[in-house]
Every structure is written in C-alpha cells, then in structure tokens.
Image (spheres, rainbow, N blue to C red):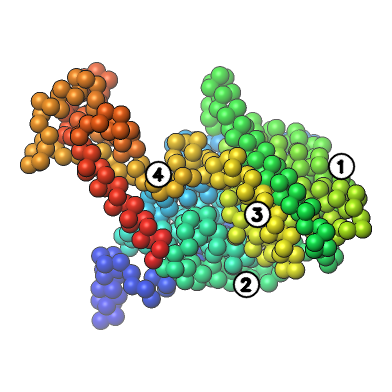
Amino acid sequence: MAVTSCKQGWQVIRTRGPGKITFWFIALLIGIAAGFAALLFRKGINWLQAAFYGTEDVQYLHSFISGLNWYWVVLIPTVGGLIVGLILHHFTNDARARSVGDVILGAALHDGRVETRAGIASAFASLITLSTGGSSGREGPVVHIAGVISTWVSNRINADGITGRDLLGCAVAAAVSASFNAPIAGALFALEVVLRHFAVHAFAPIVIASVAGTVINRIEFGGVTEFTLAEYVDLQFYAELPAFLLLGLTCGLVSVALMRSMFWAEDFGNYLQAKTGWPRWLRPAVAGALLGILALWFPHIIGVGYETMSLALTGELALHEAVVFAILKVAAVAITLGGRMGGGVFSPSLMLGALTGLGFGLIATGVFPDVSGSSSLYALAGMGAVAAAVLGAPISTTLIVFELTGDWQTGLAVMVTVSMSTALASRIVDRSFFLTQMERRGIHLAAGPQAYLLAMFMVARIMRRPDDPRAAEEDACWDLINEGTYIDGTATLEAAMPIFDSTGARFIPVVTLSADAPPELMGALFHVDALKAYNRALAATAAEEHS
C-alpha cells in the first residue's frame, strides 16, 4: 500500500507539478545535495593539492611552492592543463569549461536547465585546474555543479519554467553557502545574479536550500569565518568617507581592467589557435606552462590565492608588494581563463580587490595619518568593491564580505565603496563579467527580458503552415522570396522582427535553406503571431518576477 501511494504521489508531481510543501521539501533535498557537492569539490582540491604539491591547505599553497624544484613548479600546471584540455575536448562541443554565465543563461532561456554532460566534464576540468595551479576560483564550477543537480531533478519531475528556475536558484544558493559559509549572501546571490529578480515565491525555498548548504559546511568546518582581521578597524566616519568614494571609483576601474584582460586573453588565444592550427586540447597546457614559469618568481599567483588575501586583509604586505601582486594576479587570471583551463572569477576578484584596497589604504593613511583608520579596512572595502563589480552583485557581495570576515562594524565603508565601484564598472561593461560574456556570444541578457525573450521562439514553431486555414497565399509567398524577403525555419524571432520592421510586410515566407538546392517553402510567419508570442512571454516574465 505504501509503495502504491508513493508511486501515485510521484506521478502527481510529474504531471501536475509539486505543491508548495512538496516543493520546499525538494528544495531542502537539493540544498543538501548541492552542499555536499560543494564540500566534496573543496575537499577534492585539497586532496589533489596534497598529492601534487605536498600541501593539505589551499590557503597556504604558495608557501609550499617556494620550496619545490623549479621543474615541478612548471611541470605540474602544464600537465594539469593537458588533462583539462583532453577532458574538455572529448566531452564538450567547444572545449570550454562551463561556469556561472552558463547557469545564468540556463535560467533565462532554458527553463532553469543547464548542460549536464558538459557540466560534469567542466567540474572535473576545473577540479584539475585548481588542484594543479590554475589561478582561478572554485565558486564558478561549484555553481554549475549545483545547476546540474537541479537540472536532473527538474527533468525528473517535468518542472515548468518557473519551477525549474526556482530549483536552480535553490541549488546555486546552497552551493555558494556551502563554499563560503555564507547563508545570507548565498541566498541573495541566487536571486540577484542567477534569477535576477526577488520574487516572493522564490525566496522561501531558496533560503531553505541556502541554510541546508551552510549546515553541510559547518558540520565539516565549524562556524569559523574564512578570514580573520588582525585588529579592530575603525572608520573615521565623516573625514574618511571621501577616501572610500575614491577607492570605489578606483576599484571600478580595476575590475574593468580585470574583465577586459580576460576577454583580451580569450580573443588572443582564439587568434593564436587559428593562426597556428594547434589542436584545441593543447591550449590549456600552454596556459599551464605560462603559469608555471610565472610562478617561479611569483608563486602567489598559483591557486585561489587565500594566503595572499589574508596577508592583505591583515596589512602584512608593503605597498610595492600589493601593487606588483595585483598586476601579476590580473595576468595570471587572464592566462588561466583565456587558456580555457576552467575555474571561476569570484575568488580572484576578491584577492585583487583586497590588494587594490590595501595599496590605496597605505597611500591614504600615509598622506593623511591624522584622519585615517587602518589600511586593512581599505583592503576589506576593496575586496568587496572589485568582486561586486565583476559579478554585478553589489548586495550579495557586500554581505559575503561581512560573512567571510565576521566584521559587521565597517558596513558603511564597504557599502559606499561597493556602490561607487559597481556604478562605474556597469557603465563601461555590460553590467557584469558574466553578462558581458553572454553579450560577446550574441545573447543580450544584460538588456533585460525585452531583449532576450525573442531568442526563445523558433520561427518554425510560430509560423502558419500551408494547410492552415489562415495561411498566406503560396503565390504571394513566392513573390516575396523572389524579392529576397524570407527567413530560415531554424531562425528565431530575434532575426525575424528586424525584417518586419525594415520591410513593413504583414508576413514573411519561412523556407528551408540548403547549400545545393533552391529554398523550399515551409509556411509563413505573420507579424501579428510573432507579436502575440512575444507579448505572452513578456507577461509571463512579469508575472513570475512579481509573484
């Protein structure tokens, strides 16, 4: 009887969707699964680093590297890059590791689903990257692993778009929370960056999953914060606020430099690959070799960079060290991600921000010692400012800085710096690193639903076929085709709407195109049908965001 009841309940969930209480229970299970995935990923990095470099603590990697023979320092990331290249070559269609940008894309255009096969391959590739010296972060791969988990669940219960996106948000929140022991920031990150709305219906399940992920982290690591500030930092409120405004603008420019360097490295890598004819699986190995050579003199660029970040937050670096390390970190991150080695950008942006803030603070406290607080406060504010601008997430990043350090007394300085940084950077790039990535692929997520929803509708799904009672006359269709006015059946409304605007036509013939045959008429796309589909999508999106 119990088995029969379970089967009937499962069938109801698959056909009608989960009820509210059932959905919260599913959110809890996804949170637990994503939390364990994040924990295993982190433990896997530590285990592999112990095998490769002889250290069991990721936070002190560069100290161990300093004692290694030079050939190991170069060989380990080179071999790691070769393994990454082979994994991505065989298990993805473009030899590119998936990350947060692909999760945002899945939420916007694919009903909360991400690529499963490529996602799993990317997780293993990023694990190798971070374990063998790649200069990137672990949050990007963890977020995509969480997306793979929620995708599997959504497919099992036949979740609709709203449910699939909410489940994706639950998984992301749990993964971020478990990675950084930051439940508040994890929940807000999922809402602010992935779902890009704060609808009430999504809030409760996402919080449940975020708390579940945090519990997983604390069972293993306890309730300790990732970083500890060496001294109490005090803000000389009114006199020092202008300095933090200026620091925010500085961090905005630094974040743009970081993002532009990664895009330039990606383009340069594509150019070299095309000119030399190197196989695509060799590209990460070349990047790994470059990182290894750079690490011979500057081992701090290897890995996530928590040791250097801790030194910056406690003010234990000199001004010239902070500046040089910041420049080299930008180069190392660009090499890693431009070389398609995998990993995320959050941890590197935190490290770069801490170095930038420390350098700025050392100058400010040196020039105005009587009205300045501690330089480590500037490092803390800079850490949040650069990361917020890169991620396009001022709210969740501000909170994650507090949760990473446990210092809630410096909120005013961090908030001012973060707001100025994101305001400046978002005017120069397309809102964030991830949305600029999508824009470079021709996917206009940064402009909002009114820009990207058109790409969701295939022309062939909306057109009227010749046997439709309201179909266009065949002769009229061929007249337009002969004039050059037609569209391929595989195109989307994003390509069709400009044709309507430029021609003023009531309908556009839809054809099948092939290289060695004339166009074959499939039907006609009417302007009114396209507008109806677009309006329904806009209405559904507005309803989801305000429910």
Q: Earlier in the sequence, mark 2 or mark 4?
A: 2
**Quarter of the figure with residue 403:** bottom right
The residue tagged 3 is 419
Question: Residue 219, labelled with which disc?
Answer: 2
- Between marks 3 and 4, how big is the CA–CA gap? 27 Å
Q: Is residue 287 above or below residue 39?
A: above
Q: Earlier in the sequence, mark 3 or mark 4?
A: 3
- Between marks 2 and 4, how big is the CA–CA gap? 41 Å
320 with respect to 516 (left or right): right
- Mark nearer the viewer, 1 or 2: 1
- Between marks 3 and 2, how big is the CA–CA gap? 34 Å
Q: Amino acid at mark 3?
A: Ser
In this view, the residue in front, 407 or 62, is 407
Question: Residue 320, labelled with which disc?
Answer: 1
Q: Position of residue 179 (x, y in %)?
A: 61, 60
Q: Earlier in the sequence, mark 4 or mark 1?
A: 1
Q: Position of residue 522 (x, y in %)?
A: 17, 32
**Quarter of the figure with residue 167:** bottom left
133 with respect to 298 (left or right): left
Label 1 Cα neighbours within 10 Å, binned few <14 / some 14-19 / many ≥20: few
Q: Earlier in the sequence, mark 3 or mark 1?
A: 1
In this view, the residue in front, 47 or 282, is 282
Label 3 Cα neighbours within 10 Å, binned few <14 / some 14-19 / many ≥20: many
Q: Amino acid at mark 1?
A: His
Residue at 73% x, 52% y: name it.
245
In this view, the residue in front, 86 or 510, is 510
Q: Are marks 3 and 2 in contact (CB under 8 Å)?
A: no
Question: Residue 452, labelled with which disc?
Answer: 4
Q: Position of residue 82 (x, y in %)?
A: 60, 35
Q: Amino acid at mark 2?
A: Ile
